[in-house]
Image (spheres, rainbow, N blue to C red):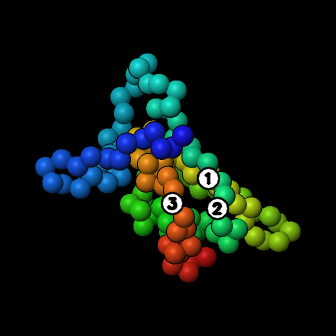
Amino acid sequence: MLGDFSPPASSLGQAVGPRAECGAAPAVSAAFSPVEWRTTLMFQSLPRELTRNALEAALDSLGFAGLYDFVFVSVDFATGQGRGSAFVNMVRPECAMAAMRALDGFSNWLACDNGSA
């Protein structure tokens, strides 16, 4: 389903990143569709070695620093290893949509970790 989102366009040769896409808070409106008001993303099939810090590092390296306010990585308490899923809450619906576009097909999760686990 994520493939339905078009990539962000640039204007006047200026790169459009996550900050540009979701910088302003949306006006409260009854015109929001059921998709537009959602801010929480669920991640599945993540590497079991992925930690919360590594997920945050990946989000930050992709330009989403400061655009999320909650990160939960599911952990098996018996082994201490991840269960391959996580939840991230973005600060605005536009940020969630930008994150879905940017992360569709992303697989380089562990390369973004700076070792601060």
Q: Of callouts 3 and 2, which one flags the residue occurring earlier in the amino acid sequence?
A: 2
Secondary structure under tag 2 reads loop
Pair 1/3: label in front: 3
Looking at the picture, tell me which residue is in the foreground, 69 or 43.
Answer: 43
Image spot of residue 108 (x, y percent):
52, 68
Q: Residue furthest left?
A: 12
Q: Position of residue 113 (x, y in %)?
A: 53, 75
Q: Residues within 10 Å of mark 2 (few under 14, many from 20)?
A: some
Helix, strand or loop at mark 3: loop
Q: Residue at x 31, y 54 (%)?
A: 17
Residue farthest to the bottom, as pictured: 115
Q: Is residue 117 left or right of residue 112?
A: right
Cα–Cα span, label 1 and label 3: 11 Å
Quarter that holds the C terminus: bottom right
Q: CA distance from mark 3 to mark 2?
A: 10 Å
Q: Earlier in the sequence, mark 1 or mark 3?
A: 1
Where is 25 relative to 31, above or below?
below
Q: Residue at x 66, y 67 (%)?
A: 47
In the picture of the structure, the residue carrying the numbered disc 2 is 46
Q: Which mark is residue 106?
A: 3
26 shown above or below 63: above
- Say whether marks 1 and 2 touch (CB < 8 Å): yes
User: Looking at the image, can residue 90 be seen?
Assistant: yes
**Could you tell whether 15 is left or right of 5 in the image?**
left
Above or below, 76 relative to 29: below
Residue at 51 percent of width and 78 percent of height: 114
**Residue wearing tag 1:** 43
Q: Nearer the viewer, residue 35 or 4?
A: 4
Give the percent coordinates (x, y) of residue 42: 61, 48
- Kind of residue at disc 2: Leu
